[in-house]
Image (cartoon, rainbow, N blue to C red):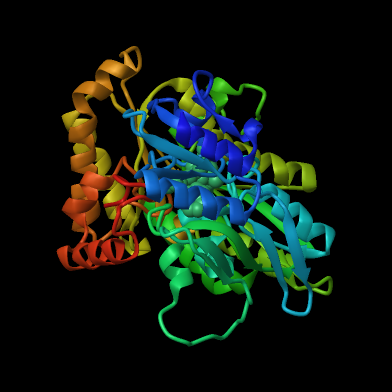
Amino acid sequence: VEVINTFTHIVGEPYVLIGSGLEDYTTDWRKRTLGKALAVVLPGNTQEVAKVVKVCIAHNIPIVPQGGNTGLVLGGIPDNSGRQLILSLKRLHHIRNIDVANACITVEAGCTLISIQVAAKKAQWFFPLSMGSEGSCTIGGNLATNAGGTQVLRYGTTRDLCLGLEIVTPQGEVLDDLSALRKDNTGYDLRHLLIGSEGTLGIITAASLKLFPLPKTKSHVWLALTDTHLVLDLLVIARQRLGTYLSAFEVMNTFSLKLVRKHYPEIAIPLLSDGKDYPWYVLLEVSDTTTITNLQPVLQAFLEDTLKDSIVSDIAIAQNLQQSQHFWKIRESIPLAQSREGLNVKHDIALPSAQIPIFVTQTDLLLSKEFRDIRIVNYGHWGDGNLHYNIQCPEGTDPKTFLAEYETNINQMVYAQVAKYRGSISAEHGIGGLKRRALQGYKSPVALAMMRTIKKALDPKNILNPGRVL
Ligand SMILES: Cc1cc2nc3c(=O)[nH]c(=O)nc-3n(C[C@H](O)[C@H](O)[C@H](O)COP(=O)(O)OP(=O)(O)OC[C@H]3O[C@@H](n4cnc5c(N)ncnc54)[C@H](O)[C@@H]3O)c2cc1C
């Protein structure tokens, strides 16, 4: 009680939540895991964050930093001990500054991703980070997980978009590194250490982010293909021929689209109809920032050649903004349709692009031999070598029972295949609590030892997000 009063004193009574009704903070997005928190504390500024951390150190209270709670690896919810404190950054939601001369925006960690996109656009600039959860996820969470999303092909991951951070250290000190310099080689790059550290090395309270010219022209094409090798051919040619125009290359297998059709029948899916569907579909986006552009003729010639060379079998071109948005809506409805279909086994993996066709063919075969009638939902940002290779249980089977029996085996088989082709068991979602054990098996022991040394040096009391990542 005493410590709760201290938190109340720091942040104000409405911003310390205890007791029942905390499920939005304690349950993960997939509704698979429910934790138990000592309290949820919502500071209103960086100084309050620092004070809360100091109180936690004094009372040995583990802290779980939380943004929008859209993470998919159990990194932002507490365990079920009831001892961990959720430190929600949601009230730090101000855009601090837009610096046109330096093409950068400085924002607080609790800003939702969409609010940053909107603020940039209002100022006639573009912030390219984009993903299905952008209405709820926060930039603090994006940075803490080094999120990827749909525009990595051209603009890079969140790491590539960040010029500086403000953080509260595990000792409750504030580090202001928001000068947003594009060049600064004064020793170890702490910003990059914090990005992707999933709340284990510091609490991000603000960030300076790169802005880009607003795309003036955009086109979206929906392509149907018959084979993974052809998808790879298409990617290679798209990179060569479309160059910097190419801004997204998303691939979906037929089953992932059939799930969308089943759960969202109002969403029409181009080139997918009974009796005429293809194994693979690609959503390709091209854009240009100038109005005097060659984009349309370049795209037209590219599409004609891919048809002529039988790389693609059919093409639908979005005729207007509404159709473009519709194409994206289909893609973004896949994870939602999967949730509606029921519990599933998710893998967010990365592979060298050239190995994707063999990986998919072999792994599909291995899994369907071992687990009859399983359904594979395979989609993702193939342009970055990132697959969401997910397994839905056989139709008519109880997902809970299926997962309890087979999830571990399925994970082992998929990750062994990933290791065989020198891929990664986490492309963009992170490790959190979910993949912590798997990390021990698939990361180099030398790298793990260095990571443990860093964690111990920066957070010797193991106050920040214990039990996640390491
Ligand atoms: C429908 C859907 C689509 C998605 N699509 C993508 C995608 O395309 N690409 C992708 O990469 N991810 C995707 N995700 C995953 C998720 O949205 C991202 O990981 C996102 O970056 C998490 O942000 P958040 O604010 O919700 O973080 P949370 O879930 O609250 O937290 C995630 C992790 O970051 C830590 N953390 C949060 N805020 C801070 C902070 N301020 N300081 C320090 N640590 C912090 C937490 O402790 C936790 O470990 C998707 C999720 C959903 C539900």
Does residue 456 appear anywhere in the picture?
yes
Taking the view exactly as shown, the residue that stands out farthest to the front is: 2
Q: What residue lies at 58% left-to-right and 64% top-to-bottom?
A: 305
Give the percent coordinates (x, y) of residue 85: 44, 38
Q: From what the image shows, is residue 120 above or below residue 13?
A: below
Corner quadrant of residue 196: bottom left
Give the percent coordinates (x, y) of residue 6: 53, 39
- In terms of depth relative to the viewer, which is nearer, 151 or 125? 125
Q: What residue lies at 62% left-to-right and 45% top-to-bottom?
A: 134
Q: What residue lies at 47% left-to-right and 87% top-to-bottom?
A: 186
**How many marks are shown on the rendered structure?**
0
Left or right: 121 in relation to 348 = right
Corner quadrant of residue 459: bottom left
Q: From what the image shows, is residue 73 above or below residue 46?
A: above
Give the percent coordinates (x, y) of residue 316: 66, 46
- In terms of depth relative to the viewer, which is nearer, 423 or 305? 423
Q: From what the image shows, is residue 148 above or below residue 136?
A: below
Give the percent coordinates (x, y) of residue 31: 44, 25
Left or right: 371 in relation to 21 = left
Does residue 307 appear anywhere in the picture?
no
